[in-house]
Image (cartoon, rainbow, N blue to C red):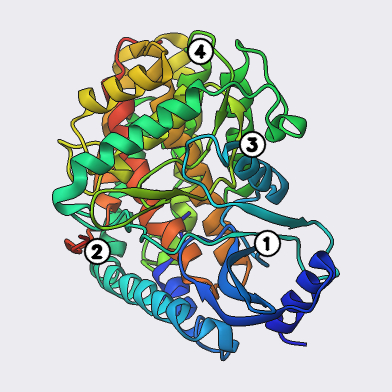
Amino acid sequence: MSLSENIAAYLGRLWGEAVEVENLSRIPGGASRETYRFDAKLGSQTKALILRRDPVGSLIDTDRRLEFLAYQSFYDLGIPVPEPVALEMAETELERPFFIMGRIDIGKAASPFTVEAYGDHAAAIGHQFFSYLGQIAKADPKGMPISTVAPAPSLDTCWSVALDYWAGVIEADLLHPQPIVYAAIRKLRRNPPPPAQKLSVVHGDYRTGNFLHDGLGKITAILDWEMAHLGDPLEDLGWALDPLWGHYDPTQVSGMLPRDEALALWQAQSGLEIDQRALDWWSLFNAVKGQAIWTSAAKEFRTGGGTDPVLGFSGWYTARRHDKIIADRLASLEGWK
Amino acid sequence: MTPTTNELLVGNFMAFAVPPPPESMGEFLSGRVSVVGLISLLAAQEAETGVAVRVWENGAIAELLARAGATVPGAADASDLSVAALDAHNAQLRLLLISVHASAELEGNLALDREILSLYQAMADRRMLVLPALPGA
């Protein structure tokens, strides 16, 4: 049976009536999930849907249950996310685990490797982008669906849990010695940040390129929650501010807003303070995290037959850019031990 | 180590070696073509400078390690300028550099720490690949 037929059979069993799947088309971008758009027809009704299926080889190992529960957690909470529809962990239906969610057809995602990605709407989009991030930081994870599965670190161990995880990824996937990222990991361990102000849902990959905008200045969907977890809300802020996502414009964070303006929006929406030393720590951490992701991509590309060029590009061009970002940051942190 | 130019260009071929299923023929395929194009563009830079950058980096690390009093491993065959040979020597040198840097930090040797951090910046600078400005809006 084709993928379309398998999806139709699955949804038919799920909904208890005959389903036809039309216009199935894989969407490019990312390598942590295979993403497809399709229409499901039930009688006279048509549902616009997205399938997110585990890939054979991946940029990162992520838990599709956490991603699905993250969508459930924020759906109807004022953050524009698609409606979660079904989660299937068994490999019998579509060969690999997957979930299905509603499709938001209005909007497009920007490539991080373009200049002036948001044109005249950069400020308007930046306002929403950092405001939504502040709202995610402010939300109490207690009682949210994601908290039924995601471990909750104590406030003073958010940093070490995150660092241990990503340092472990580098250790496991490294194919060539990387002195720059190793120096950063040692520096982070010697200079821990203050405890988190609160425990938040951390999106995990909140950045330019992982949301849709309508081309007229409105964000229509916050996507790609595959690395969602509970932790220090400054983690997401540090990732969003990383120069890799700056669209080559050092005067605007995420290619949208001046840094101070972005931080003020986040503070106003989250109700949290920004401790500069803590943000410095989380910024360096995020560059390490990025390097860990690219290290995994390089390993996957080299050991997986080299058939996915996104993995090759990520493990090469982006890895070298993050080496540069880390090296410059290390040189600027003279006051640290 | 990031993938080599050789691996990346073979990968560009492999990306199209197997005909994609019908659902991957449209938008996904054109996205894949774009990434393959970017890799080819950057591979041209790497083909031009990759050997020279590796020779420079190995020399710079060896020089710093010697000044720091370390016993520096030589290349298995100094006349072999293949990427594989240079990378093998680079791995030895980088491992020793990691060890020397960690010791300098523990001993509070700020001068050596600064020197190594400056070297890291130079290494990262030289290995950078430059994407042309791709319009976005």
Q: Are marks 4 and 3 on the same chain?
A: yes
Q: Earlier in the sequence, mark 1 or mark 4?
A: 1
Report the side of A270 relative to B20 (left or right). Answer: left
Q: What crowding class fits label 1: few (fewer than 14 Cα within 10 Å), some (14-19), or many (20 or more)?
A: many
Residue behind mark 1: A54
Q: Earlier in the sequence, mark 4 or mark 3?
A: 3
Q: What residue sits 45% from the left and 23% below the top?
A: A234
Q: Are marks 2 and 4 on the same chain?
A: no
SS for tag 3? Answer: helix
SS for tag 1? Answer: loop
Residue behind mark 4: A192
Q: What crowding class fits label 4: few (fewer than 14 Cα within 10 Å), some (14-19), or many (20 or more)?
A: some
**Cα–Cα gap, marks 1 and 2:** 37 Å
- The image shows residue A69 at horizontal and vertical percentages of 68, 42
**Cα–Cα gap, marks 3 and 1:** 22 Å
Tell me the quarter of the image containing the C terminus of chain A. top left
Chain of the residue under label 3: A
Residue behind mark 3: A168
Q: Are marks 3 and 2 on the same chain?
A: no
State the residue in front, A222 or B29.
A222
Q: Earlier in the sequence, mark 3 or mark 1?
A: 1
Q: What residue sits 34% from the left and 32% below the top?
A: A130
Report the side of A242 relative to A84 (left or right). Answer: left
Q: What residue sits 27% from the left and 43% below the top?
A: A125
- The image shows residue A110 at horizontal and vertical percentages of 32, 57
Q: Amino acid at mark 4?
A: Pro
SS for tag 2? Answer: helix
Q: Amino acid at mark 1?
A: Asp
Is label 1 or label 4 in front? 1
Badges 2 and 4: C-beta atoms under 8 Å apart? no
Residue A120 visible somewhere in the drawing:
yes
Query: Looking at the rendered structure, which numbered label has been put on residue B49?
Result: 2
